[in-house]
Image (cartoon, rainbow, N blue to C red):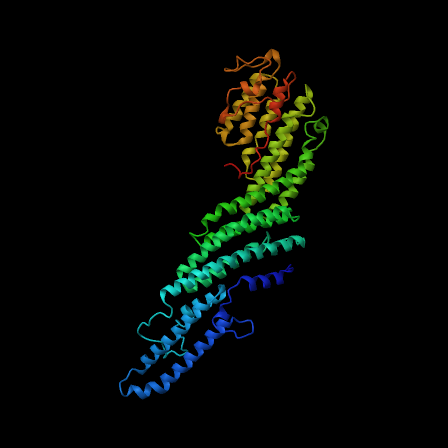
């Protein structure tokens, strides 16, 4: 395993970078590619010999009007082409193939190949060093080896990430955000190989980009699975992974427009998975704290504060997450707290009657204000959640059906498109069920409910409300059937899917 930030960068740069300096013959150390050294020597010999021709042979023949320079150029060019054809037959592996392609396109084909401004290969076009069929074969073989190499590079990146998880290294905070080297590693991998391919031809560059897109598309689910199965899953590491995916999504699309669009959905999906896992951690921490709500102790004590302290601690980590994703996650946390609060209210552990019922309604109003102020202070933009608890509190505090109807009208009037908000839509249906389940002597039977008997399952008999949702009866009033209680137990339940906040 490779540990340490410097060794990671050094190891990865050696493994995935394209050693163009070596391939151009600028290095003669023991680690240089033998083929690169051979071509460097060949180029040096051609330059020396042609300089002598230009300085010594050309003057002797120019007086006689003989084109010695052009004749020597074509002869040398033919000899170099023949030698390259021989080398092309024996070239193997990604590096050797690139050496031939790069030397042919960029070294020999360079205007300053001969090393002097007054020395050029020819003013007339020369035949290609490599036949088109040979060039096409070299490019095809190179891309085949390159695909395997890039896949191996992604394997190496995953191994480096796993070594960090095993070492329990906390992510850095760079520019206020949790940071993992993952996105930098992938950017370096893509940029190096695309740049190298672009130096050969536009076609090879496009092919390399497609290879990188496919390899990254296969890497993402592997990384996601390995990370979530590791012991490194924590708020900082989840935040760093969210930031890495967001960086890849925005920067790759900007740097290579028209190529990485197909990876936007997988990257967003990975972000959503990490967001969901982040929220699951919050839910695990606060779920026990909801159980003390709607009890006798809740009426006289501030049992909500420990829950909100957990929320504030959770939001502290979101300060180091990309702003857009942090806002989405915060709004989902806001929605969860409101939904779970209402679920506890509508499935109380203790029955409230008389004064306690009114006190409970008032307590809900205070809790709603505390929840709203806390999330507003944290920056949540889900303002539409603010009236969900107060509306239900007003309804639960009433005893007359006319007043309940008035609160319902206020709810629907304030939110004409209730169907677009799950929590409010469910609150509407639950409130409608409250109308039905009032005291027997004053029970309201709206139009469409005349067929409902005392033993009828309310959830089956209820007419559909906005969005096709049927009313469900909460366990608040006495004389509820077992079926109604079961229906109420599902009220405001989570649908199990993480989604971005609704507009």
What residue is shown at x 43% (from left), y 67% (from top)? 101
What residue is shown at x 53% (from left), y 19% (from top)? 462
What residue is shown at x 31% (from left), y 75% (from top)? 123
Please determine whether, in this image, residue 419 is positioned above or below residue 273: above
What count of labels does the image hold? 0
Which quadrant of the rendered structure holds the N terminus? bottom right
* Along the line of sight, the residue nearer the viewer: 111 or 290: 111
Residue sitting at the far left: 65
- Where is residue 83 drawn, in percent x and y? 41, 74
Q: Is residue 475 found left or right of 153 in the rendered image?
A: right
What residue is shown at x 65% (from left), y 60% (from top)? 4
- Where is residue 218 drawn, in percent x and y? 52, 50
Please determine whether, in this image, residue 175 is positioned above or below residue 110: above
- Where is residue 62 drawn, in percent x and y? 29, 86
Answer whether residue 111 is visible to the viewer in this image. Answer: no
* Along the line of sight, the residue nearer the viewer: 490 or 431: 490
* Along the line of sight, the residue nearer the viewer: 44 or 443: 44
Residue sitting at the far top: 441
Please determine whether, in this image, residue 197 is positioned above or below residue 378: below
- Where is residue 433 drawn, in percent x and y? 57, 20
Answer whether residue 314 is visible to the viewer in this image. Answer: yes
């Amino acid at each position: 395993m490779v540990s340490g930030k410097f060794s990671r960068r050094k190891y990865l740069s050696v493994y995935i970078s394209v050693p163009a300096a070596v391939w151009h013959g600028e290095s003669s150390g023991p680690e240089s590619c033998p083929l690169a050294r051979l071509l460097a020597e060949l180029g040096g010999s051609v330059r020396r010999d042609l300089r002598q021709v230009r300085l010594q042979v050309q003057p002797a023949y120019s007086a006689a009007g003989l084109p010695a320079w052009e004749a020597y150029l074509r002869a040398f060019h033919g000899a170099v082409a023949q030698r390259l054809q021989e080398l092309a037959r024996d070239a193997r592996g990604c590096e050797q193939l690139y050496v031939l392609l790069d030397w042919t396109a960029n070294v020999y084909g360079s205007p300053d190949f001969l090393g002097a401004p007054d020395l050029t290969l020819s003013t007339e076009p020369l035949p290609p060093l490599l036949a088109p069929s040979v060039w096409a074969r070299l490019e095809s073989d190179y891309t085949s080896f390159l695909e395997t190499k890039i896949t191996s590079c992604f394997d190496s990146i995953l191994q480096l990430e796993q070594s960090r998880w095993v070492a329990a290294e906390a992510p850095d905070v760079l520019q206020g955000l949790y940071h993992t080297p993952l996105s930098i590693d992938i950017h370096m991998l893509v940029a190096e190989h695309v740049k190298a391919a672009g130096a050969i031809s536009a076609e090879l560059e496009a092919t390399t980009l497609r290879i990188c897109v496919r390899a990254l598309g296969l890497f993402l689910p592997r990384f996601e699975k390995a990370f979530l199965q590791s012991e490194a899953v924590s708020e900082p590491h989840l935040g760093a992974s969210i930031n890495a995916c967001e960086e890849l999504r925005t920067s790759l699309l900007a740097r290579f427009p028209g190529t990485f669009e197909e990876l936007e959905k997988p990257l967003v999906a990975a972000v959503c998975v990490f967001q969901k896992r982040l929220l699951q951690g919050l839910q695990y921490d606060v779920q026990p704290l909801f159980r003390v709500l709607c009890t006798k102790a809740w009426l006289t004590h501030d049992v909500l504060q420990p829950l909100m302290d957990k929320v504030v601690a959770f939001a502290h980590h979101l300060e180091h997450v990309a702003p857009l994703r942090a806002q989405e996650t915060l709004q989902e946390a806001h929605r969860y707290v409101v939904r779970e609060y209402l679920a506890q209210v509508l499935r109380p552990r203790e029955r409230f009657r008389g004064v306690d019922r009114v006190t409970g309604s008032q307590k809900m109003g205070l809790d709603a204000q505390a929840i709203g102020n806390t999330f507003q202070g944290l920056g949540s933009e889900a303002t539409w959640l603010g009236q969900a608890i107060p509306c239900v509190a007003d309804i639960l505090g009433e005893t007359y059906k006319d007043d309940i109807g008035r609160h319902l009208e206020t709810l629907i009037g304030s939110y004409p498109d209730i169907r677009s908000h799950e929590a409010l839509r469910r609150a509407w249906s639950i409130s409608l069920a409250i109308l039905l389940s009032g005291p027997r002597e004053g029970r309201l039977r709206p139009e469409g409910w005349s067929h409902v008997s005392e033993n009828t399952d309310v959830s089956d008999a209820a007419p559909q409300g906005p969005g096709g949702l049927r009313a469900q009866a909460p366990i608040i009033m006495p004389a509820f059937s077992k079926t109604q209680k079961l229906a109420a137990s599902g009220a405001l339940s989570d649908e199990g899917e993480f989604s971005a906040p609704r507009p």
